[in-house]
Amino acid sequence: MLRPRTERPRPAGLLEVAASTCAVLLTLATAWHGFGVYFCLGGLCPGPTGGEVLAYRLLVSALGLAVVASLALAVRRRARSALLWHGLVALSAVATALVFAVPSIDLRELREPAPSPPDRGYVPCYSGSGDCLGG
């Protein structure tokens, strides 16, 4: 009598392990980079330079590639426990990329209402025109 063959997940390949390790290391590197850009002692911090913005974009691009690769490789080998790990790494990568964004994300713009357009009957006052109220 033949028993049905159960599908056991294959062990993780070298590429999946490398992608996951790169994702974790790039998450830490992104946090370190963002901390280095915005941490300063005494006085005002100058804004990020063009090189720092470029470095952030390259780090986040490589991080996204590593996360997608590790998730895709885990899906390909149908490993649920590995998907949980890669999902946690992906969530921490997204959180790190947003928290340590260069340039930083300003949420105040979302809360402040947009300025209202001027009234249709508004006549601008130019100096010397004689049309200004009050002289």
Image (spheres, grey):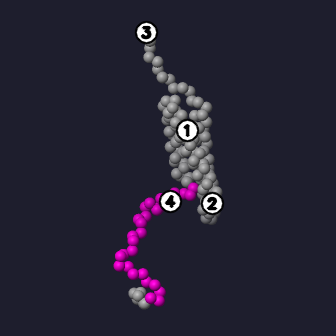
Observer-side mark, 2 or 1, equals 1
Q: CA distance from mark 2 to mark 3?
A: 71 Å
Residue 128 among those drawn in magenta: yes
Q: Nearer the viewer, residue 55 or 36?
A: 55
Q: Earlier in the sequence, mark 3 or mark 1?
A: 3
Q: Taking the image as drawn, is residue 58 in sight? A: yes
- Name the mark on residue 106: 4
Residue at 52% in and 29% down: 77
Q: Which residue is mark 3?
A: 1
- Give the Cα separation between the discs numbered 4 and 1: 31 Å
Which of pointers 2 and 3 lies earlier in the amino acid sequence?
Answer: 3
Direction top: furthest residue: 1
Up the image or down, 102 lies above or below 118; here it is: above
Q: Position of residue 23 (x, y in %)?
A: 58, 41
Q: With respect to residue 122, does 99 lie above or below?
A: above
- C-alpha span from label 4 to label 3: 67 Å
Q: Distance between the Cα atoms at labels 2 and 4?
A: 17 Å
Give the amino acid type for the residue marked by disc 4 in the picture: Asp
Q: Quadrant of residue 120?
A: bottom left
Magenta-drawn segment: 102-129
Q: Secondary structure at mark 4?
A: loop
Q: What residue did someone put label 2 on? A: 49
Could you tell me which quadrant the C terminus lies in? bottom left
Observer-nearest residue: 39 or 62? 62
Q: Position of residue 73 (x, y in %)?
A: 54, 34
Quadrant location of residue 44? bottom right
